[in-house]
Image (cartoon, helix red, strand yellow):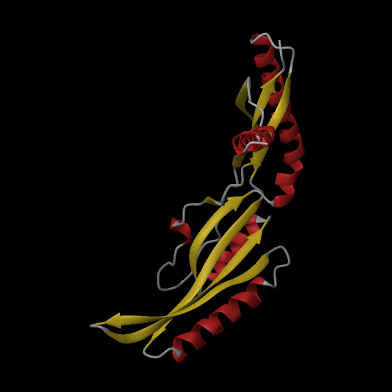
Amino acid sequence: MPVSLLLTLVLALFTGSVLAHQDPPQYNRVNLNESANTEVENDLLVAVLFAQAEGGDAAAPADEVNRLVEWAVNVATSHPEVKVQTLGYRSSAMYGKNSIRGWRVNQSLRLESRDSRVLGDLIAQLQQQLQVQSIGYQVSEEERRRHLDGLTAEALSRFQARAEHIARSLGHSGYRVVRLNINDSRHNPMPVARGMMMETSADRSVAPARIEAGTQQMTISVNGEIELNAK
């Protein structure tokens, strides 16, 4: 067999193999989005407080912060309705004129509870020694899960209805789902005005905080791609 003919046959076989592995052309594909939402009660109050001290060396402020946090944890854990968690411990140098002039030590304490009255009273008590970093409401995982399945079903139903409407409007007999993504919104705690919660005057007496929970919107979104059937 002539070499030129052999090369032609090899090239034809190679080209045919490459074409056989290529994806078939895609036609009549549509991207669409749908969602469902509802108002959900904020049922979990979250507060972060912190202890902070400064000193010429690291040991003295560290000892003070350790004592303050230990006191706060002991007070907080006496309330079974409140979940208590200590957060990051940080010791950092304070500089002045290019040299270390002292040390600052701080540590945070995270509190959460479904009973806002109990937690409000506790925050007021802890403000005798600690400062408030943030207070906010959020939806608990249990409450979020309670609404998740219903919202997901509603969002999928809307996606399906819209896909069917698009197929009919364009004169196609139906469709198939090529790609589908389902996402649910997860909100950060809703901030609450801190004016009443900040450190007060010398007597350090703080009135208990009374904070309304309110609601926030929970959304399930569905986005995907459909391929319309032949007409």
Q: Is residue 153 left or right of residue 50?
A: right
Q: Is residue 99 left or right of residue 47?
A: left
Where does residue 198 sit, x and y in percent of width and height?
Answer: 45, 63
Residue in front for this viewpoint, 192 or 37: 37
How many dots with numbers? 0
Q: Quadrant of the N terminus?
A: top right
Q: Residue 17 falls in which quadrant of the image?
A: top right
Q: Is residue 178 visible?
A: yes
Q: At 56% across and 51% down in the image, what residue appears?
A: 188
Q: Is residue 127 visible?
A: no
From this view, report whether residue 17 is shown above or below residue 160: below
From this view, report whether residue 18 is shown above or below residue 122: above
Where does residue 49 sit, x and y in percent of width and height?
Answer: 53, 67
Q: Residue 77 falls in which quadrant of the image?
A: bottom right
Q: Residue 218 falls in which quadrant of the image?
A: top right
Where does residue 127 sit, x and y in percent of width and height?
Answer: 51, 69
Q: At 59% across and 43% down in the image, what residue appears?
A: 214
From this view, report whether residue 132 is shown above or below residue 2: below
Q: Quadrant of the C terminus?
A: top right
Residue in front for this viewpoint, 78 or 113: 113
Residue, far front: 2
Q: Is residue 164 left or right of residue 72?
A: right
Residue in front for this viewpoint, 158 or 42: 158
Q: At 57% across and 65% down in the image, what residue appears?
A: 123
Where does residue 38 sit, x and y in percent of width and height?
Answer: 65, 34
